[in-house]
Amino acid sequence: MNIVVAIKHIPSIADDLPVKGNNVDFDSVDFVLNEFDEQSIEQAVLVKEAVGGTVTVVGVDLIGELDNVLHLALAKGADKAVKVTADEPGADSHQQAKWLAEAIKGMSPDIVFAGVQASNDLDGQIGPMIAAYLDMPYIGGVSSVEAAEGTAIVTKEFAGGNAGKYSVSLPIVVGVQAAPKPPRYAPVSKVRQVAQTATIEKISPSADGAGAGLSMKKMAPPVVTGHAEMFTGSSKEVAAKIVELLKSKGLA
Amino acid sequence: MLTTIEKVIFILLALVSAGFTIHGIKTIVDSVRKGRPTPELKNVPSSLLKAGVAVLFQRTIFKARKVLSTIHLGLFFGLITYAFVNLVDVLEGFIPGFELIYGGRNFAFTFLPAGIINAFNLIADLMSGALLFSIAVMMMRRFVVKDKRLNYRENVLLNPKVKAGAHQKDSATVGLFVVMHVAARLLGQAYRLDTGADPFMPIASFLNSIFGASQTGLHIAWWVSIAWVLYILPYITRSKHTHFTVGPVNLGLAKQNPHGQLDPAVPLKVVNGNHYDPGAKFLHDLSWKRVLDSYACVQCNRCQDVCPANFYGRPLSPSALEVNKRYLIKEATFGSHPDRLLLPLTETVISPEAIWSCTTCYACVRVCPVGNEPMADIIDIRRRMLIDGAEIDSGVQNALQSLATNGNWMSKGKRLRGRWAKEMEFPVKNATEEPVENLWFVGDTASFDERVIPNTKMVARIFNQAGLDFGIMYQNESNAGNDVRRVGEEGLFEQLVEQNMQAFGKAQFKQIVTTDPHSFNTLKNEYPQFGGKFEVKHYTVTLLKLFEEGKLTVKNKLSHYKVTFHDPCYLGRYNGGFTAPRKLLELLGVDFHEMPRNCENSFCCGAGGGQIWMGKVAPGERPAENRIREALTTFEKNSSDKKQLFIVTCPKDMVMYSDAVKTTGNEGKIEVRDIIQLVAEAVGVEMPIEAEPAPSPA
């Protein structure tokens, strides 16, 4: 089975997010792999382990540091790594989807996995747009995939803890909410070994603009307006205070 | 004494016995030799000699269980005496007239003075009594009183044979041997005394007064006594009683490197061009010394007594690990299961859950009288599990992932590491930008944990007030990797070492000061292997020096505090840092009370070896909770109205014990404080009015 994972490199929020002008200060922020993409790599490797095949991970190299992420993916069980060398830290999800779709097109995939969304823009567009560019169906919010020849059983999450099972025919683009198992750990020695031996295929981005056509007017951290009030005292006193508060708000 | 036919029978039996014994020994030697190389042992004859002296004085066993250890003296010296006694008895059987040495009468071998003969008889006689008494006590303890410490928890993985009580049978067999052998021999001596009592054989003389003298009786007793020996020698090579001979040897071959330096994941010395994967999956992935450990172990379970994981009800028993290893080899060599050696150790020797329960506190290694290092096995197994992609606790995984990307386990950005320093009322130097005398390696918990940061700032204030020239490395510092290495992530450890060595390379400093004992341990003991040439001090030593040099003076004596002190494993047991904190407390004038488990015998807080990262918390009384109760009991014995403080010198302890005070419902009775808080109060640090914590990204 030919499995492709489209990933996204995004600014880390482990540090305070630095703002410069009307966007993130990309020069002073670390980039990390989108959390949902970690899930989707795990899901891809699980499918490969179940039915065989190859996993190709493809991403857009926005700041020239995508190799680390690709090495990690290879150490976790991916077989090939491809990067679109864009060097455009601010490229939006529409633009990235276009580049990713162009890279994937020649791979004739059976399944394309993409994280259902990313924490930097939260617009969940990469998956559906890749599907549109490749003229493939899309199913998002997925928490489990069992693939077979030409078909797959896909579990999709709904609100209220409900889940739906779909039988889909391949090829398909799947937006991964979570893998059925927590993403595996890749020991550093293995990642380092991969880094020394692996070759990463480079693709130049097409010049076609495909951005969302939106431009940012202002970016600012939220204004802190108040602090949480902590009730102290014995459990009885705290309970009394809570009751009092609820009453004062007209809730009890 | 023996007839010709008897002599022939004896020689035949002795040959059979020797054959089985030699086969037994050879099997052990072969198994041990299959293990991997250990780090090079230097000056082996002198270490063996030292171990011999330690064993002769039974020094190592007295680290715990003083009463039983005294009983063990009877066994030890009794059996040594009997080795000579048996030799003399055999000679008696073969050399006519030799029996006359007994009683020192008509001695045929005139070159030995009667005094020596009498002394030999007296020692043999008294030691027979000591041996019978000791073995009786030990057997009573095991089979009548049923000392619980000899048992394993239900959840501990045990070899099926052990589970079925094979080790009990083993103890019974050897116990019975000692009783029968010694009793037969004593009775023989009694039968021998045909001219009445011998003052140099009091016990035999007493028995003689009951049973009288009998040449036939002597003859039969001789055979019973010696036949047992012929049976027991080969038996011992197939039982836990290899302890008798392997114990002292193993002690002599024990780890020579610092306690705090782990053996490498892959042997540095390659034998016959062997390729080694890191760590251990199968028995013979362990070093030969780890295999030998299993033959030295007699399952006294002292290690289990002091194991915080075992206390916590986790399925870990260091002793079970050793006995399982030995039974695994036994089944493969003497039994019919060589295939079991091809099963992972996590199925045959120790369960994965037990593997991940170890806090690497070193208590098991410290207490072991025969120099075993079960903790080393555990870390080697962890190492391979990580390489093989075994599923690991999600909390540990998150910590490791964060360590790989952020250099700290708390998923904080690198640049946030020095934030506390930027909030100080005076500038804290960046050691990577300007030279400092003391490079303060702060550590993750002290840098990031909101509960600990006030103490970190206090250390800075005291250093500043004392005029100590110090700086920190801000975002250039990475986790030192002590616990990363002990979780088994050797590659990540090496990466962290490289990052820190790079940072140290940028800095100019005379020495490193740490607040975290874990960082202290690896910087001091493991970084030298990676080119780290620097002196490392724990802040308790630095503070003490500042007092001694008069740069800090106690203005207010703190006699209103009743205080106890917890030795952190990685400062105390690993690195012997017992005195500096105690001297500091003495200087500060507190009312100090030592807990029963102190110094070498300190009880782990339960956080080490990656336990603090674990996402899952097991039910049961946690080690830290037990420790708080121990402190309170100590205080109760010295009751007064003073405020009761539990003093720590490790940021992790601050977190662990503050929690434990809450979860045991002892808030108000006891308070956990870092020693720096007491120092600050005693020297009178002017506290700035703490600003409201800065609201996150403003």
Image (cartoon, coloured by chain):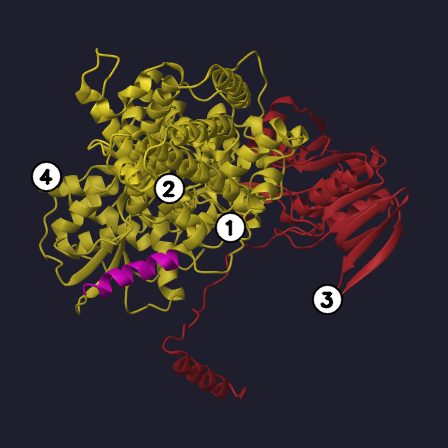
Chain colours: A red, B yellow
Q: Secondary structure at mark 1?
A: loop
* For discs 4 and 3, the disc positioned in front in the rendered view: 4
**First in sequence: mark 2 vs mark 4:** 2
Mark 4 residue element = loop
Name the residue type under label 1: Met
Residue B622 lies, in percent from the top left, at: 43, 57
Amino acid type of the residue tagged 4 in the rendering? Glu
Q: Which residue is mark 2?
A: B135
Question: Is disc 2 surrounded by few (<14), some (14 to 19) or many (20+) residues within 10 Å?
Answer: many
Q: Are marks 1 and 3 on the same chain?
A: no
Determine contact: label 3, label 2, CB under 8 Å. Answer: no
> Which is in the foreground here, disc 4 or disc 1?
1
Kind of residue sitting beneath label 2: Ile
Q: Which one is in front, A179 or B505? A: A179
Instruction: Find disc 1 in the rendering and name its residue.
Output: B614
Q: Quick check: A199 above or below A74?
A: above
Residue placed most toward the observer, B334 or B181: B181
Measure how far apart labels 2 and 4 are at the Cα level: 57 Å
Over which residues does the magenta segment extend? B624-638
Chain of residue at mark 1: B
Residue at x 53%, y 33% (from the top left corner)? B326
Instruction: Report which quarter residue B102 is drawn in.
Output: top left
Confirm whether residue B424 shows in the render: no
Q: Quadrant of residue B551?
A: top left
Residue matched to label 3:
A159
Please name the residue shown 15% across and 41% down the image.
B546
Reading the chain from its start, which is encountered first: label 4 or label 1?
Answer: 4
Label 2 or label 4, whichever lies nearer to me, is: 2
Q: Do the residues at discs 4 and 3 belong to one chain?
A: no
Determine whether label 2 and label 4 are within 8 Å by CB.
no
The residue at which mark 4 appears reads as: B549
